[in-house]
Image (cartoon, rainbow, N blue to C red):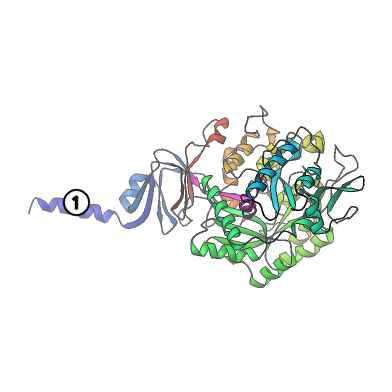
Amino acid sequence: MKRLLPALLLLAAACKQKEYNADMLVKNAVVYTVDSNFTTASAFVVSGGKILAVGNADSLEQKYNAREVVDAQGAAVYPGFIDAHAHFYEYGMGLQEVNLVGTHSWPEIIDSVKTYSERNTDGWIIGNGWDQNDWTNKHFPDKAKLDSLFPVRPVILSRVDGHAAIANQAALNIAGVKPGQTINGGEIETNNGKLTGILVDNAVGIVTRKIPEPTPAMVDTALLSAQSNCFTVGLTTVDDCGLPYTMVNTINELQHKGDLKMRMYVMLADRQENYDYLFKHGIIKTPRLNVRAFKVYADGALGSRGACLLKPYADSAKWNGFLLSNPKHFEEIAPKIAAHGFQMCTHAIGDSAVRVMLKIYAANLKGKNDLRWRIEHSQIVSPQDIDKFGEYSVIPSVQPTHATSDMYWAGKRLGNERLKTAYAYKQLLKQNGWIPLGTDFPVENINPLYTFYAAVERKDLKGFPEGGFQSENALSRIEALKGMTIWAAKANFEEKEKGSIEPGKYADFVILNKDIMKVKGSEIPTTKVTKTYINGVKVYDKK
């Protein structure tokens, strides 16, 4: 008995040291906490879905008794990635339609549509993702071939940015589109008095509004399939830009049931029924859903020449693009959004559209503030307007892969002088000291590691151009990581609950097979997510 006493005392002492129980201990890791000092650690503890403590494994193991131990085996661990600008639901719906991303010619698109139609014999044929700038013949196509193949079945195929589409005659007939018809903020293209099928910006909606509403099962499938793909690339929060209010309950119910685990920051579309809904209900906030913003469209896209420019396009001397609404519309809704305490997030790509919105923002924000109104894309900004972002605390929400997708032809659209302040992320970052990053998927690839690569290297996936596209506007690796974690969280008013690995925040984190803060730039795009966690629960595991 005397011999057992010392052993029992030691055991009791050891047990006493472990003062707390925990759900998980992650150890043997390189943990980029992305806290205010950008510190690294080797371990952290999770309890109740939140980070409990961060430090080294020895001290944490002495203090906490964890039910699960994750040995990272030296791998790099990051806060869960946040996409500050995406179209999550639209992407999910697109997975059920004709995928035209990466097609290189109109005949290739026709073949894809024919193949899809043979497998899906009923209803509208809907496709998305084509980009005429990737073709040898870079002109918009004509609907003649679609008409001959599908004389009765309606077809509409959207350009990659969603700001242009081609529809066959059957679809145009259903929508009542006629030659010579005009629409504010859009274009219905004709050639020799006949419809070509090309619709730009607001004209697209004339046809898409005639497409039957998806069934509840299709909606659920879209959200859950989008979630699965996003978890694979380490996304734990997405900003879904421009949804109808009717989607809020659908998302909330799926999340409440536990099927939809993705955290979502939802911006409602610029429609009266959406304003009525949110003004009545106020901010909607749960641990996984945040609805407190409106997505407004000022202009179209550069690729389809719908971006509104101060001076004509360099490759279309009499064309400046256009605003999608009369400026009076923006002037009327901005004070209403401000009065109700919501965030205004405006799509503005051309320098004229950016200037219009900055003036309207300035009139309502009245100097420095913390309302975090955003200009989405901020692609082409006049040198005279850049300082306005800082003066009125306007947040430029940008998508780095747009720069590396557009760089092949952007100079032709803009000319060399105007190109200098296009995709100027470093200059924009300096205005407020932080900048949120996104992808705009499905316009671009959903992978946030491509965002990181484009931001720091300013190259495409083949390593072009050698010195980087306008590399003076490249972000540092620290800035890029913050842009897709803590700064993206801040853009959503969520920096106190996510975006870094710190005690009290949600245990959303990812483990990568390479350390993107240290590997060669060329290795960043080949880096893979090995595990994704939300609330300390594994939602993806690369076997």
Residue type, numbered disc 1 = Leu
Q: Residue at x 39, y 47 (%)?
A: 26
Q: Residue at x 69, y 48 (%)?
A: 127
Q: Pick out the residue farthest to the top.
A: 466
Q: Pick out the residue farthest to the right.
A: 192
Q: Observer-nearest residue: 441 or 198?
A: 198
On whether residue 417 falls in the magenta region, the answer is: no
Image position, residue 401 (x, y; %): 66, 40
Q: Quadrant of the C terminus?
A: top left
Mark 1 residue element: helix
Q: Magenta region: which residues? A: 78-99
On whether residue 79 falls in the magenta region, the answer is: yes
Residue tagged 1:
10
Q: Residues within 10 Å of mark 1 (few under 14, many from 20)?
A: few
Residue 58, image quadrant: top left
Image position, residue 249 (x, y; %): 59, 66
